[in-house]
Image: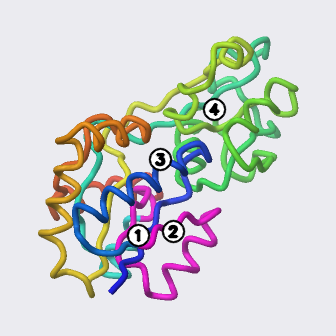
């Protein structure tokens, strides 16, 4: 039986080749066929999940509550030392030194990553700005947000921190951070459909040993997961979900 393995659509396109390499290595470790699925956006991801044939998901933390509580998915692993933080940034000569200085009616560029948008709204609470106070501008990627900020199409943009920090020096000289989250406990997690619960020990072993040899280390480096994965216990998963639900309240 082929296992469907979905990667949350939260990563820039340059990671796609790395995920395919990861999947090739992963199949060898498991000695079984795995079909890698890279949905283009959150809507496509949820449509595929609702069809009920996704065995394994590398999910962002904001989808974890629905997947665990409503769909019965089981925690497997989390990446080590890779918290999901976000950056609010503007163009370099913008009249803002901090996100608290943004005003109602401001224009903010965002991708389809609802988790980053939700976290950004939390960071904007000291500025007394809510979702309906903002003119949202959609972008397909974080590089597009950077380009359009540099062109001064918006007052600010929301970035996944890891994506922001991978920009080249030319781009970073033309934009500036206004705020970066420091939650530390939010991470993507790997979840397993309950129909495949018997595979949990085998999957845990494969993820855990991915970083134990040179090829696996190289693949993980390319995906910005240099320290590999470790087991995610149910108690840790519930703590993460409680944190997410607190942010969403």
Which of the numbered marks, if any, corresponds to residue 127?
4
Residue occupied by mark 2: 37
Front disc: 1 or 3: 3
Q: Quadrant of residue 244?
A: bottom left
Q: Earlier in the sequence, mark 4 or mark 3?
A: 3
Residue occupied by mark 1: 5
In the rendered view, does 137 fall on the left or right side of 10?
A: right
Alpha-carbon distance for marks 2 and 3? 13 Å
Q: Is residue 81 above or below residue 134?
A: above
Front disc: 4 or 1: 1
Which of the numbered marks, if any, corresponds to residue 18?
3
Q: Quadrant of residue 84?
A: top left
In the rendered view of the protein, which quadrant contains the N terminus? bottom left
Q: Is residue 17 above or below residue 181?
A: below
Q: Secondary structure at mark 3?
A: helix
Part of the protein shown in magenta: 35-63
Whether label 4 touches label 3, CB < 8 Å: no
């Amino acid at each position: 039986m082929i296992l469907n393995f979905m990667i949350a659509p939260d990563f820039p396109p340059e990671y796609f080749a790395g995920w395919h390499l990861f999947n090739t290595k992963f199949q060898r470790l498991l000695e079984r066929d795995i079909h890698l699925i890279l949905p283009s956006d959150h809507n496509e991801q949820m449509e595929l999940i609702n069809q009920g044939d996704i065995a394994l998901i590398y999910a962002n933390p904001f989808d974890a509550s629905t997947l665990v509580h409503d769909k019965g998915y089981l925690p497997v692993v989390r990446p080590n030392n890779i918290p999901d933080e976000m950056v609010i940034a503007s163009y370099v000569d913008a009249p803002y030194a901090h996100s608290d200085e943004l005003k109602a009616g401001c224009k903010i560029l965002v991708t389809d990553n609802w988790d980053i948008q939700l976290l950004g709204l939390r960071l904007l609470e000291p500025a007394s700005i809510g979702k309906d106070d903002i003119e949202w501008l959609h972008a397909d990627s974080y590089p597009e947000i950077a380009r359009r900020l540099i062109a001064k199409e918006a007052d600010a943009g929301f970035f996944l921190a890891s994506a922001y920090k991978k920009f080249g020096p030319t781009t970073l000289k033309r934009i500036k951070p206004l705020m970066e989250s420091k939650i530390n406990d939010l991470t993507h997690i790997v979840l397993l459909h309950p129909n495949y619960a018997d595979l949990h020990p085998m999957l845990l072993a494969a993820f855990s040993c991915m970083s134990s040899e040179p090829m696996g280390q190289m693949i993980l480096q390319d995906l910005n997961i240099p320290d590999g994965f470790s087991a995610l216990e149910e108690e840790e998963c519930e703590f993460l979900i409680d944190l997410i639900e607190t942010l969403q309240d």
